[in-house]
Amino acid sequence: MRVAIFSLGLWLAGCATAPTEPAYVPTGDPVADGNARLAVAPVQDRPLWACRLGLEALRRGDWTDARAKLDEAILAQGGIMGPRADAERARSKFHREREKLFVGEPYERVMAYFYRAILYWMDGEPDNARACYRTAQLLDSDAATAAYKSDWVLPDYLDALASARMSADWADALLRAQQNFRGTLPPMDPESNVLVFVELGRGPVKYAGGEYGERLYFQPGTSLARTAVLQVAGRTLRIGTQDDITFQATTRGGRAMDLILEDKADFKETTDAVGDLSLVGAAISASQPRRHRNDELTLGLAAVGLLSKIASAATTPEADTRCWNNLPQWLGFVALRLPPGDYPASVEFRSADGQAVPGSPRQFTLQVKPAPGDTVLILSELTP
């Protein structure tokens, strides 16, 4: 019995050892540091770093790298659904959530397609952009039971705009967007050739709670700014926000992963209790005088206790707190018409009471390209 217990202790100690990532020297540059982390990241974390770096590249205007990174992240999202070893691991009680391939929570998956759509539109492919918006809406819905319906605004609104651009029916998509938005959406102009996307603040981050860390919670995002004011070609455009990322992260309801983690916690607690009771029973049985002792019962209780303890120790219900941590808090959009050419422009980010936030205004040149392509402008409070 002592040998068995000693072996169990060694086995549990081995389970407690966490893999470590190779060291790297940070430079302070988010792209350089992110690529350094990506180079040494375990395979299950690569999609997360691809998301972060793809967004950073998009904000910096490195379209080629943004496409490559976002495509890598989206490919990983699709792969988890197939008959792969990762999918099987995702159903197991004995693998930590963060050891699985990162696909993100629904809002993170939506954002990967949202940003990829921007690049498709930039490349003159509104049909592929529309496909991304529609996929994003499906990812935020429960297709199996229809228990949860997507309530994002911009994916539907931009679906409508892309459809209008292709002379397809767009009324239903625009209606869904308006139903999910309490304010007034920007006018729908199929002839607009300048698409302006706005990002404000820093989005939510995840943390774990509960007895075993099985509950996934969100620290709400923060933002000093609530609107952006664009001045270009003698026009002043106040750009509001249509989507709240914290709201999307926290209001979808009982997701499948929540139930899996609760099941894991219940399983861990139950097997641990069974193990305790069985080992206590074995100890009581073993302490009886030989004439009253049932050795088979003692060994049986001890075996059940040890196996239950092993199962409990091997069950890892901790929530996956890996997070796409450079998302914004608010998303906004407006479209306008401008003739081709270069335009001096400025953007000022303003708080809810109309005051300019630190770092405003910013001066830049808007380069409007000739037809048939559209000009895509990204105004991000997170970009210095």
Image: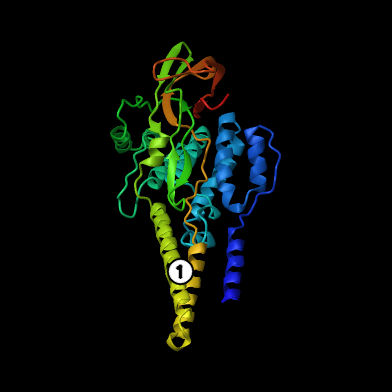
Q: Is residue 168 above or below residue 288?
A: above
Residue closest to the far bottom: 291
Residue 335: % across, % down: 42, 25
Which residue is farthest front?
Answer: 289
The residue located at (56%, 33%) in the rendering is 58
- Residue 83 in sight in this render: no
Residue at image location 38% in from the left, 28% down from the top: 190
Residue 20, position as x, y percentages in the image: 65, 51
The secondary element bearing badge 1 is classed as helix
Q: Quadrant of residue 160?
A: top left
Task: Name the colour scheme.
Answer: rainbow
What residue did someone put label 1 on?
275
Q: Identify which amino acid the numbered label 1 is placed on.
A: Gly
Camera-side residue: 61 or 268?
268
367 or 291: nearer the eye? 291
Residue 174 in view of the camera? yes
Residue 109 x, y percent position in the rendering: 46, 44
